[in-house]
Image (tube, rainbow, N blue to C red):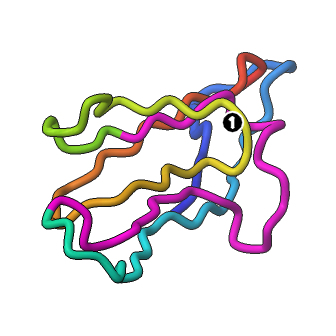
Amino acid sequence: MTISNDQSSTSNSQIPFTIPILYGTASVPLDTKDLNSDFRWCVFLRHPNGENLKPYIKSVTFLLHESFDTPFRRITEEPFAVIETGWGEFNIQILIELQDCF
């Protein structure tokens, strides 16, 4: 996936750009009998080569399942990630807010 300011017309102060990003999830099983926390999982957004995205990205908001106490997680510093525990699968939306200069 890439972030782009793909504008049909550019002024002298705006130059088109594209930034590659990698997003995904990972989980590991927990050694617990707690039915509400079978896994520790993470959802993340980062540059494929580990480069700093902060000059381009102001924040990343992860929209988790509504059953979480705080389903909207706005992250303003790298790493752009949420780490939680849980037991099921659900869709996660990711909203990227670019820095004001873009």
Residue 96 coordinates in the image, percent (x, y) = 52, 37
**Position of the C terminus by quadrant:** top right
Q: Can residue 48 be found in the magenta stretch?
A: yes
Secondary element under disc 1, as helix, strand or loop, is strand
Residue 51 occupies quadrant: bottom right
In the rendered image of this protein, does residue 53 appear above or below residue 42?
above
In the rendered image of this protein, does residue 82 appear above or below residue 14?
below
Q: Can residue 50 be found in the magenta stretch?
A: yes
Q: Which span is picked out in magenta?
A: 36-62
Q: Nearer the viewer, residue 15 or 68?
A: 68
Q: Nearer the viewer, residue 11 or 80?
A: 80
Residue 54 coordinates in the image, percent (x, y) = 79, 39
Q: Amino acid at mark 1?
A: Ile
Residue 66 coordinates in the image, percent (x, y) = 15, 35
What residue do we see at 78% from left, 73% from top? 49
What residue do we see at 25% from left, 64% from top? 37
In the rendered image of this protein, does residue 26 appear above or below residue 53?
below
What residue do we see at 54% from left, 37% from top? 60
What residue do we see at 68% from left, 36% from top? 57
In the rendered image of this protein, does residue 31 appear above or below residue 20?
below
**Mark 1 = which residue?**
57
Question: In this view, which residue lies farthest toward the front?
Answer: 33
Specify few, some or many for label 1: CA neighbours under 10 Å numbering under 14, 14-19, or 20 or more: some
